[in-house]
Amino acid sequence: MLEVLRKSKNSSAIVVIVGAIVVTFIFWGSSRGGAPTAGIAARVNGKPISIQQVGFEARRQIDQYRARTGKRPSDIEEQAIQQKALQSLIDRELLKQQAKALGLRVSDYELKRSIIRQFSDENGKFNKEAYKRQTRFYPNYERDERERLLIAKLDDFIESSLSVSDAEVMDMLSGRNTRVNLEYVKVDPRLLASRIKPSDDEVEAWAGEHEAEIKAKYDEDFDRLYNIPKKVRARHILMKVDDDDPETVVSEVRRRMEEVKKRAETESFADLARQFSEDPGSTSRGGDLGFFDEKRMDPAFSKVAFSLPVGQVSDLVKTKFGYHLIKVEEVQDARIRPLEDVRLDIARKLLARERARSEADALAKRIEALWATSGDELDALLKEHHVSARTTGLIPLSSDMLPGIGQAPELVEAVKALHPEDPTPSKPFKVGEAFVFIRLKERQEPDPAELEKQKATWKAIVLMQKKNAFLQSWLNELRADAEIQRQARFGPNS
């Protein structure tokens, strides 16, 4: 691939191959941290990434998370952020190696010129003391500044090779600004199945001939439907605190919760929940959470709820949401519904589904024969089978999600070709198991003059989209070809 890059610097091929690199580099920050003194997290083609580097990058991403959400990430979220931090450093190293392989270098003169520019005042006077402070605080400043300049060169290299034509931009704008309203009929076997009611004799006869299918369906749904875990029904009272709240606030919440716990000895727990709980989902129900299994709740909450005797109020329980009081009202022991108990229920559903698919296929063929001409006969057929014609409302021509229909790439492409003089595709489309018939009811074209006004702004956006699209493919290829060794806790090697 590097040979292609070198030979294709001024060709359109460079667009496909290197266009994506820029995006990653643009969002790099300096890897503030010293040499890998705290152990190695990974090696990328022999180049080490230190645990210290991963820590700095993870903290940077955690700071971004807190700025975005206003809260600290949970332990599980922090683990995910740490994995993401290492992956971003691996990708960064891979791309840096490729930049160097392309022959891009930063001279000492270029580094010096950049440093002087950064530490000079508005009159051009170099501030030597500010520079010394920076290097004391940030020992690897010059190394990372050289990398930043290398990346800037790569950025320039790519930008000089990329292009977005006016035609590309106008096609994109046309798709975003053209509006279409579609009439559609959806023949969905799942909906038909709900209306099919085979008799008990039919189900029994079908089951006798399809035991293997019934067993396979039972096994498929076993964990979800038939292996029923222990559940408890509990009420709770929640008073919220945040990890960043001062100790005075936390202490006050604890004091109030202790008072509520004392009152619960003689007063209705449900009434106290309505009065004091800050859980919007359960307060109006007196704190009632219904039945839940152990995996559904916060681990600290579940640990108490599943060990608490029925009728007893817990001590204060701390979770990421705040402090809780819990009262268990009922317990359902774990149980398994054996195949023999549910065999006919499964058979009934499978038989109804089988008949629904056959009925949907036959109905789709009848609709197809009438769809292009429409009329009373089609209306009568749809009414007979309780199927309705609906409309999407006006939506952008570029929409990949069609209201009421879903994601259907083949259908979306067909819609782009529809016009008032040719409003109906020649065949139905399969979306999942459903047959979908469409007809163009309305098409609103954009004003060309308005598109022309937007062209310059959107040209840069289209370029960025092109870079983003190529980035994943580029990185996937680099990862596949690289020798990447991770420390065990950071995931598998490649």
Image (spheres, rainbow, N blue to C red):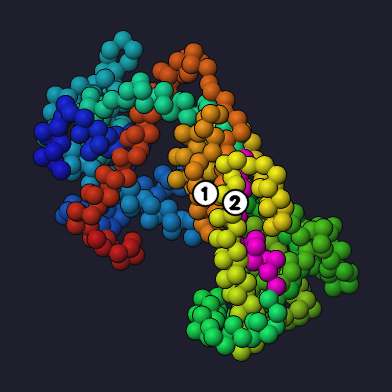
Q: Is residue 143 visible?
A: no
- Which residue is painted at 41% across and 18% down in the image? 456
Q: Which numbered disc flags the more N-terminal residue, 1 or 2?
A: 2
Q: Which residues are magenta?
A: 183-197
Numbered tag placed on residue 161 in the rendering? none
Q: Amino acid at mark 1?
A: Pro
Whether 208 is drawn above or below 186: the answer is below
Cβ atoms under marks 1 and 2 closer than 8 Å: yes
Whether 124 is drawn above or below 131: the answer is above
User: Percent from the top left, x then y, of residue 27?
Assistant: 36, 36
User: Percent from the top left, x then y, of residue 449?
Assistant: 49, 13
Numbered tag placed on residue 367 in the rendering? 2
Q: Amino acid at mark 2?
A: Ile
Q: Is residue 360 visible?
A: yes
Residue 102: in magenta span? no
Disc 2 element: helix
Q: Which residue is mark 1?
A: 428
Whether 335 is drawn above or below 39: the answer is below
User: Percent from the top left, x then y, of residue 258?
Assistant: 77, 65
Please name whichever residue, 180 or 327, is drawn nearer the observer in this view of the structure: 180
Q: Is residue 232 left or right of residue 408?
A: right
- Which residue is painted at 63% across and 72% down in the image? 352
Q: Is residue 167 left or right of residue 233?
A: left
Q: Is residue 291 left or right of residue 124?
A: right
Indicate the quadrant containing the N terminus: top left, top right, bottom left or bottom right: top left
User: Percent from the top left, x then y, of residue 102?
Assistant: 13, 36
Disc 1 element: loop
- How packed is label 1: few (under 14 Cα within 10 Å), some, or many (20 or more)? many
- Which residue is painted at 68% across and 52% down in the image? 382
Q: CA distance from mark 1 to mark 2?
A: 9 Å
Indicate the quadrant containing the C terminus: top left, top right, bottom left or bottom right: bottom left
> Of the residues tagged 1 and 2, which is closer to the observer?
2
